[in-house]
Amino acid sequence: MSAMDVDPRDEPGAPSTSFPPDLFELASDVAMVGAPPSDVVASQIFQMHPLPDVFAAIGEADEGSKREADLCSFLDRMFQTGPGKAMLASAMPYARAGMQADSPRVRQLACTQLGRAAQQVVAAAPEDSAGCLTSLVDAVGDEDSGVAAAA
């Protein structure tokens, strides 16, 4: 069974035991897989590792480190899942803070999530999209080309 499969012996609604409980090991595994986990697995991961914990870990990671890169890739992939998309609105304070980070990788993640959130906001309430779009327009001029491209 791969690290991202759901163990059928797990009880419904309980976090799976088929993926690593350690956030950094899990983030590294998800980063290596290269694709987002299934929605069922994503829900279980978010139960074990709530967004505030993941954002705190990113904040504690050394700039440019493998740990930071893996955590950013992990969150990027998690936000591509159904449960992750549902959490985008609650993650906006973190994305706005990420836009001010020294780390280009964190700013790039923030741009990507602001872009995803802006798509949701424009579809649901176009009048509320100005904040997301302004931050993204500002990021187009970022000194890091990866951040500018993500914006």
Image (cartoon, grey):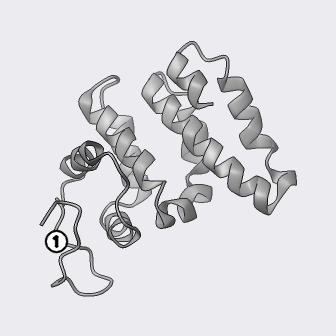
Front position in the image: 27 or 82:
82
Q: Say which amino acid is labelled 1.
A: Thr
| Residue at the farthest top position | 143
| Residue at the farthest left position | 1
Residue at disc 1, secondary structure: loop
Q: Considering the image in quadrants, where does the N terminus appear?
A: bottom left
Question: Residue 28, percent across and down?
Answer: 23, 44
Where 18 falls versus 72 (above or below)? below
Q: Indicate left or right for 53 with 82 as reference.
A: left
Where 44 falls versus 136 (above or below)? below
Q: Indicate left or right for 81 with 24 as reference.
A: right
Question: Residue 87, percent across and down?
Answer: 54, 61
Q: Quadrant of residue 10?
A: bottom left
Residue neighbourhood size for the residue with mark 1, other residues' Cα within 10 Å, grouped as few (<14), some (14–19), many (≥20): some
Question: Residue 136, percent across and down?
Answer: 69, 32
Q: Residue at x 38, y 45 (%)?
A: 56
Figure disc tally: 1
Q: Residue at x 55, y 60 (%)?
A: 85
**Residue that mark 1 sits on:** 17
Q: Quadrant of residue 88?
A: bottom right
Q: Residue at x 54, y 17 (%)?
A: 145
Question: Residue 7, percent across and down?
Answer: 18, 76
Q: Residue at x 39, y 36 (%)?
A: 59
Q: Indicate left or right for 30 with 72 as reference.
A: left
Q: Considering the image in quadrants, where does the C terminus appear?
A: top right
